[in-house]
Amino acid sequence: MLRLALLAGVGLAKGALGVNLIASHFSGGIYTLSLTTTGTSGTISVTSQTNGCGTTPGWIELYSDTRKLYCFDESWTGRGQHAEFNVQNDGRLSLASSLQVSGNSVHGILYGGPDGRSYIATAEYSPSTITTYKLPLQGSRVQQTEKFTLARRGPHQRQDVPHPHEVHLDPTGKFILVPDLGADLIRVFRIDTNSGRLTSCASHATGAGDGPRHVKFWKSESGKEKVFSLNELGNSVSAWDVNYTNDCISLTRTHSISTYAPGKKGGANTKAAEIRTFGNFLYASNRADQTFGNSQDSIAIYTIDPTTGAIAWLEAANSYSYYPRTFAFNKNGTLVAIGGQTSSNVAIVARDTATGKLGNLVANVQVGQKGRAGEEDGLSAVVWAE
């Protein structure tokens, strides 16, 4: 496990330390990466590659306590494959089980049951569905499918039909939130823990044309809960108050802020991609803005008021990548791994835990073949295997 401490500002501890990461690629490969840091610099390399998650792995979820990795196939061909891998101590993967599915799953999680991980839920972008399965994966069948419809088209050209983009488990493990990019909704489902079945609660409307993609929960020290949503089409993030009432979650939108600095905005092809929180800081990645030069997109950083949960612009940081679709913090919050989809690289960037700001590039590696701008190829996801 990588255990790093800040020396001063944005820096790393003395001594050589190593850790593994795992990255997926839209060409079908799942890669293990090895990162070694010495002082304020480091090296990262690809140590192994495997397959088994169909033709277009789009999302990976790592459960570090059981050392299990779940991979979800975004194949657009009408046929896909979800997979479960065992993660060895050196980060190498071995296929444990797999399941043939209809594909186009852009996100997936484990939920429900006595251990909170007895079922799988996935979001299918173009079929406009969420689907559930009972574990074990091998030999499982579709347990439940929820098909969404749209009464009228949204203001954006991509809002022709509902496009669920994520299945996000709430902190209690009793609800799943589904941001729907096509319908401008955050859908809420109550979980039957024993059967794994999902029951629809009231949905919550975003701004017209926002196109919500991902969400994250946050809780203050005093217990106030917020949901932050990333709006792909609107290039913004929104804050929502959270209330648990009548066996459902109620969301009230309080404010929204651009993923660009005040007075600036994204271009015709820019799209917000991923959202993360760490402590009282919020982060969102921007694709194709090239804020820091040719093929150097940005990460937007916000402060979170520790009492109210209100968010405020802090600054934009270099992602050291083009089309940063994915990023994740290490456990200590001293490093962030940023996955550039089109550049197909994993950039390791230093983070100051006091200010929340991102700093220098620590290490960088290309993973698989580079993608094409605006296409569904290149790197798709990256996680720390700590």
Image (cartoon, rainbow, N blue to C red):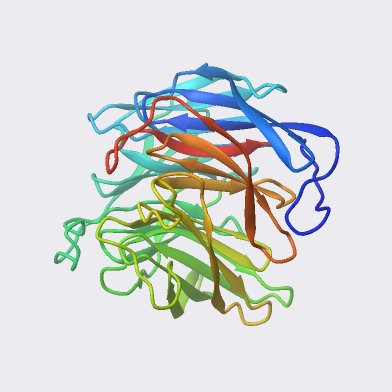
Q: Residue at x 49, y 70 (%)?
A: 249
Looking at the image, residue 294 sits to the left or right of residue 34; the answer is: left
Residue lying furthest front: 293
The foreground one among 147 and 66 is 66
The percent coordinates of residue 262 (x first, y second) are 44, 77
Is 265 placed above or below 23 here? Answer: below
Whether residue 138 can be seen here: no
Whether residue 120 can be seen here: yes
Q: Residue at x 64, y 54 (%)?
A: 359
Looking at the image, residue 77 sits to the left or right of residue 210; the answer is: left
The percent coordinates of residue 30 (x first, y second) are 49, 25
The percent coordinates of residue 73 (x first, y second) are 38, 32
Q: Residue at x 16, y 57 (%)?
A: 160
The foreground one among 265 and 126 is 265
Number of numbered markers:
0
Is 368 placed above or below 10 here? Answer: above
Is 18 placed above or below 271 here? Answer: above
| Picture quadrant of residue 301 | bottom right
Q: Quadrant of the C terminus?
A: top right
Looking at the image, residue 278 sits to the left or right of residue 373; the answer is: right
The foreground one among 3 and 245 is 3
Q: Residue at x 44, y 23 (%)?
A: 29
The percent coordinates of residue 266 (x first, y second) are 33, 64
Q: Quadrant of the N terminus?
A: top right
Is 376 placed above or below 77 here? Answer: below
